[in-house]
Image (tube, rainbow, N blue to C red):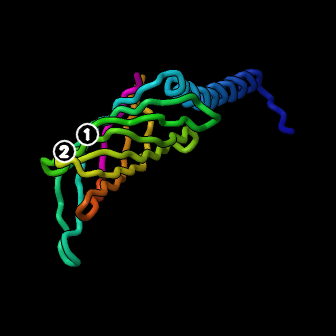
Amino acid sequence: MMKIKSHKKAIMTIAVIAMVAAIAMSMVIVPAFAAETEIQDKHLYIEAKGVAFRRVDNETIRRSDVELALTLELGKRNGTRIKVLNANGTVVVNGTSYTIESGEGVILTRWHVAYVRCRGVDASGNETAFGVRVVYFWWGGNLYAFRAKALLKTEENPWLLLLRGATKVY
């Protein structure tokens, strides 16, 4: 073990170790507290914008703008999982609106990832399926930011959606 010859150096060394420990503890405690707000609240409101891609034939890919407005109802937390009980909202691709009527999924808080599968209808009454994988991070308070990849299956070719947005916990 090293001997410290100066009393001032010993006090300075202890102070530095205490500051490093305090900073390390705050990094561990703050993310855990941020996840707790997600557990106690029951609804998430999601808004996102992005781009959608559809293969028209073997050579042509069509690009369109997309907007998403979705509300998720959350269940109870089970370890690092939160179950999504229901989903409703709309997906607008190139001016065509698709209504989300129901959905289910899971939020994995340990990896900050969510998976949601939804069912809905288009303007003509045809059934659609919507599956999304979300990677999110805490943005402060009850607000989370995310990036998502989704697949919107319609009666025509499916749309690949790349989205960015924000989620508010209520």
Residue 167: say if magenta: yes
**Residue 165, image x and y in percent?**
31, 39
**Residue 3, image x and y in percent?**
84, 34
Please say if 101 is above or below 34: below
Among the two numbered marks 1 and 2 on one chain, the one whose residue lies closer to the N terminus: 1
Q: Which residue is at 39% across, 51% downward?
A: 131
In the rendered view, does 10 fall on the left or right side of 92?
Answer: right
Quadrant of the image for the N terminus? top right
Quadrant of the image for the C terminus? top left
Residue corresponding to mark 1: 90
Of residues 70 and 140, which is closer to you in this image?
70
Residue corresponding to mark 2: 97
Q: Which residue is at 67% across, 28% downward?
A: 21
The quarter of the picture where residue 54 lies is bottom left
In the rendered view, does 17 fall on the left or right side of 130?
Answer: right
Q: Which mark is residue 13?
A: none
Callout 1 secondary element? strand
Q: Residues within 10 Å of mark 2 (few under 14, many from 20)?
A: some
- The residue type indicated by label 1 comes to Thr
Please say if 94 is above or below 99: below
Q: Residues within 10 Å of mark 1 (few under 14, many from 20)?
A: some
Residue farthest along the front direction in this orientation: 125
Callout 2 secondary element? strand
Are the two marked residues, 1 and 2, in contact with CB atoms closer than 8 angstroms? yes
Estimate the spatial distance between the alpha carbons at disc 1 and disc 2, rounded to whole Å: 7 Å
Please give the range of residues in magenta. 163-170
Of residues 141 and 92, which is closer to you in this image?
92
- The residue type indicated by label 2 comes to Ser
**Residue 161, image x and y in percent?**
29, 54
Residue farthest along the bottom direction in this orientation: 58
